[in-house]
Image (cartoon, rainbow, N blue to C red):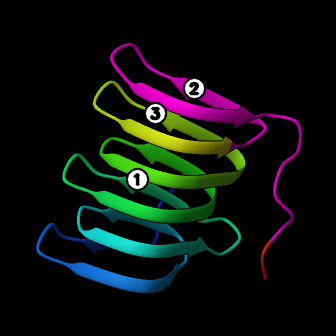
């Protein structure tokens, strides 16, 4: 994947509410609320990242901690350092050795495209 635009949100950042993003985003901060990715978006929740809420995006990689609902139009990956408690919904789900998932997983339908 060729990345032209990159968003980096560092570990000192804290959000409450809805965070909308486009393109490629690395999130190392803390969020209580919702993350909404536009079409073509990909997000990495870094090892310092903590999300308590909902994430919707094309592709999601979890290296940090997420509690809530995660939905992807293409793929969700939980890495070896990733921790997810909640619900996963994506056509493709990958959990690496050492990754933790507790909850419900649905792999039937992709999310509709966001404009």
Contact between labelled residues 2 and 3, with CB atoms less than 8 Å apart: yes
Q: What secondary structure is found at the residue carrying circle 3?
A: strand
* Residue at 26% in and 57% down: 49
Of callouts 3 and 1, which one flags the residue occurring earlier in the amino acid sequence?
1
Mark 1 = which residue?
A: 44
Q: For the residue carrying disc 3, how many other residues have a C-alpha within 10 Å: few (<14), some (14-19), or many (20+)?
A: many
Asked if residue 97 is positioned above or below residue 67 in the image, the reply reads above
Q: CA distance from mark 2 to mark 1?
A: 14 Å
**Does the magenta run of residues contain 77?**
no
Asked if residue 84 is positioned above or below residue 16 in the image, the reply reads above
Asked if residue 63 is positioned above or below residue 25 in the image, the reply reads above
Q: CA distance from mark 3 to mark 1?
A: 10 Å
Foreground residue, 5 or 98?
98
Give the x, y percent position of residue 28: 24, 61
Give the x, y percent position of residue 58: 66, 57
Give the x, y percent position of residue 47: 22, 46
* Residue at 40% in and 50% down: 66
Mark 2 = which residue?
A: 94
Q: For the residue carrying disc 2, how many other residues have a C-alpha within 10 Å: few (<14), some (14-19), or many (20+)?
A: few
| Quadrant location of the C terminus in the rendered image | bottom right
Position of residue 81 in the picture relative to residue 33 (left or right): left
Q: What secondary structure is found at the residue carrying circle 2?
A: strand
Q: Please, which residue is most extreme toward the top here? A: 97
Contact between labelled residues 1 and 2, with CB atoms less than 8 Å apart: no
* Residue at 47% in and 29% down: 101
Foreground residue, 100 or 92?
100
Of callouts 3 and 2, which one flags the residue occurring earlier in the amino acid sequence?
3
Report the disc number at residue 78.
3
Q: Which residues are magenta?
A: 89-113
Q: How many marks overall?
A: 3
């Amino acid at each position: 994947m060729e990345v032209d635009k990159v968003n980096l949100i560092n570990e000192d950042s804290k959000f409450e509410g809805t965070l909308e993003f486009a393109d490629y985003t690395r999130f190392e901060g803390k969020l209580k609320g919702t993350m909404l990715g536009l079409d073509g978006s990909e997000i990495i929740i870094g090892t310092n990242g903590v999300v308590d809420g909902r994430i919707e995006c094309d592709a999601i990689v979890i290296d940090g901690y997420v509690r809530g609902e995660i939905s992807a139009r293409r793929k969700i990956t939980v890495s070896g350092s990733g921790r997810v408690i909640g619900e996963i919904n994506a056509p493709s789900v990958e959990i690496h050795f050492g990754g933790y998932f507790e909850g419900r997983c649905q792999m039937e339908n992709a999310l509709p495209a966001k404009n």
